[in-house]
Amino acid sequence: MTPTIIQHVTYPNLGWDTAADLYLPPDFNAAKRHPAIVSTHPIGSCKEQTAGNIYAKGLAEKGFVVLVHDASFQGASGGKPRFIEDPSIRVSDIRFAVDYLQSLPYVDENRIGAIGVCGGGAYTIHAGITDHRLRALVSVTGVNYGRLIREGFAQFKPLEFSESMAGMRTAEALGGSRHVVDLLPASVEAGNQAGITDIDVLEATDYYKTARGRQPNGATRQLMSFSSAAMGWDAFLNAEVLLTQPLMVVIGDKAGGFGAFRDGWEIYGRAASKDKHIVVAEGWSHYDLYDKPEPVAIAMTRIVPFFRENL
């Protein structure tokens, strides 16, 4: 079979350019109009990792045009300072991706959907709540970053964490260095030595810090002094009223500290969508769904017909 075509593209964002990879089907015909999908990467990730080389590639092989972008301030996309993780801008990135797809003559502007992994899954859901150009939504092991930063990142002390970030931001405003942190230990061994037992942290490290998933722009770094923007954010806000598109939520049942299992069931329950589905990959974890063939196959077996039916 002819291999999937990948085109490297850039397009305007708020005040900088977004870098993205456009995955085209093996039998791509520019004279036809195709359904298209925006694929959004996890927090600390990049377009070359799971949202791109697994899900975008897999969907393109099934006939979809798929655009996977680097988040603003991250990867090859523009924006300064670097390594900002601001949920409102991450969702805005998805809207700009839709703009770009709608500008392409071979994309049917009325048949655009979205998929996201981990934090990108919840960003995708929030984008669908607020932008109904997105006709169908898939969240793969999606994590509500607002909840996560108030709980796990803050060690369940959100007020103290907010005050800490305020102090960082003040110090930077007065000329201090940026507070960029690595979200993960340097290796699984280092994590074990530090007493980390949570499977999500250890499995994330195995994915991002080894040849399994490592990519040059998959930095797993965050400008923590700018992360206060997430403290009052909720990926699922107004889902009971505004989330009406067809929705598919994919989770593993081996729950870890990042909370994808609980977030998946929450949004499945809250969504106003009449056509909604939850897919539980039994015996598999959050990071298994990033790239391991068997759980990815469980997901894709449901995702592909879902998009074919709704786009």
Image (cartoon, rainbow, N blue to C red):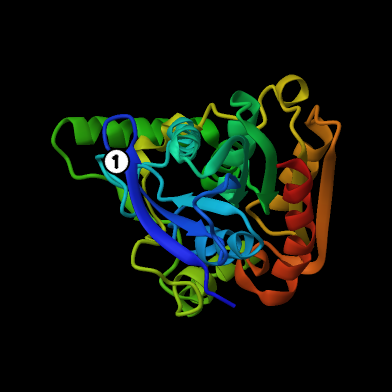
Quadrant for residue 216, please give it.
Answer: bottom left
Is the C terminus in the top left, top right, bottom left or bottom right quadrant? top right
Question: Which of these two is toward me, 27 or 148?
Answer: 27
256 displayed left or right of 78:
right
Residue 262 seen from this side: no
Instruction: Classify mark 1: residues with Cα within 10 Å, few (<14), some (14-19) or many (20+).
Output: some
Secondary structure category for the residue under label 1? strand
Residue 190: x, y in percent? Answer: 46, 75
Is the N terminus in the top left, top right, bottom left or bottom right quadrant? bottom right
Q: Residue at (37%, 43%) from the top-left corner? A: 224
Residue 173: x, y in percent? Answer: 19, 30
Q: Of all residues shown, which one is farthest toward the top?
A: 241
Quadrant for residue 89, please give it.
Answer: top left
Residue 177: x, y in percent? Answer: 19, 45
Vertical placement of 5 versus 258: above or below? Answer: below
Q: Of all residues shown, which one is farthest toward the left?
A: 175
Residue 119 seen from this side: yes
Tag 1: amino acid: Asp
Q: Which residue is mark 1?
A: 17
Quadrant for residue 81, please give it.
Answer: top left
Vertical placement of 105 versus 306: above or below? Answer: above
Q: Residue at (44%, 34%) from the top-left corner? A: 96
Q: Residue at (43%, 57%) from the top-left corner? A: 46
Residue 50: x, y in percent? Answer: 54, 63
Question: Which of these two is toward me, 77 or 168?
Answer: 77
